[in-house]
Amino acid sequence: MKNEKYEFIYEYGRAALEEELQRFQNIENKSARYLGLLSVGVVAYTVLLRSFSSSIFPPNGFLDYAACVVVGGTYLAMASSWSFLYRSITFSGMPRLQFDKNFIERCESMDLPTIHLALTRSCAEAIEVAREQNSEKVHLLVMAYKEIALSMWGLTGSVILILANNL
C-alpha cells in the first residue's frame, strides 16, 4: 500500500538533509581555502618584515615602538584567525541515516507508509544535528573573517609605519 503523502515528506526530508550536508562541505571548503591563503599571507608578511627588520629592531624611537606593537598585534590576529579556521574544519560526525541489518529487519515487519514515516523522522533528527554543527562552523568562520580583517588592518598599519620610519 503506497501512500504518496509519506513518500513526499520523506523525499522532501532527504533533500533537506542533502542540502545541509552540502552546506557543511561548502563551509569546510571555504575554511580550507582561507586557511591556505592566510598561511601564504603569514609567510609573505614574515618575508617582508625580515627585509625591513633592521630598520625597526631594536626599536629606537616612537615609530619603531609603534611598528613593533602593530607587528605583534598583527601576528596575534593572524594566529587567532588560524585558530578559528582550524576549529571550523575539525572533524565532526555528520549525521547519517541508519541503513544496516537491524534497520532492514525492522522494516520487514512494517508497511511502506510506516517505513516512510520512520525514515522521515530519521531525516528530521539528522537535519537538526547537521544544522547545529553548520551553525557552529559558520560562527567560527565569521570570527575568522573578523580576525583576518583585523590582521589586514594591522598589516597595512605596520607597512605604513615601517615605510614612514625609512623615509
Image (tube, grey):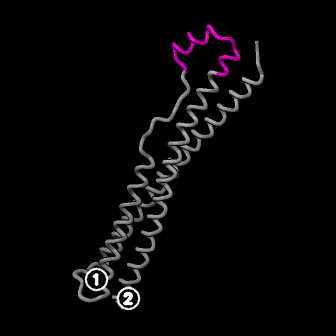
Query: For residue 65, which numbered disc appears in the image?
Result: 1
Whether residue 156 sits left or right of residue 52 in the image: it is right
> Magenta region: which residues?
99-117
Q: Main secondary structure of the magenta part?
A: helix
Picture layout, residue 53 above or below residue 7: below
For the point 60% across and 30% down, which residue is it?
123
Could you give the CA–CA distance between mark 1 and mark 2, rounded to whole angstroms? 13 Å
Task: Give SS at disc 2.
Answer: helix
Where is residue 128 shown, x and y percent of the image? 56, 37
Where is residue 109 shown, x and y percent of the image? 62, 7
For the point 44% across and 47% down, which residue is it?
89
Whether residue 92 sits left or right of residue 71 in the image: it is right
Q: Earlier in the sequence, mark 1 or mark 2?
A: 1
Q: Residue furthest bottom?
A: 167
Where is residue 53 shown, x and y percent of the image? 28, 78
Q: Which residue is mark 2?
A: 164
Q: Quadrant of the N terminus?
A: top right
Where is residue 101 shown, x and y percent of the image? 52, 13
Give the residue type at disc 1.
Answer: Tyr
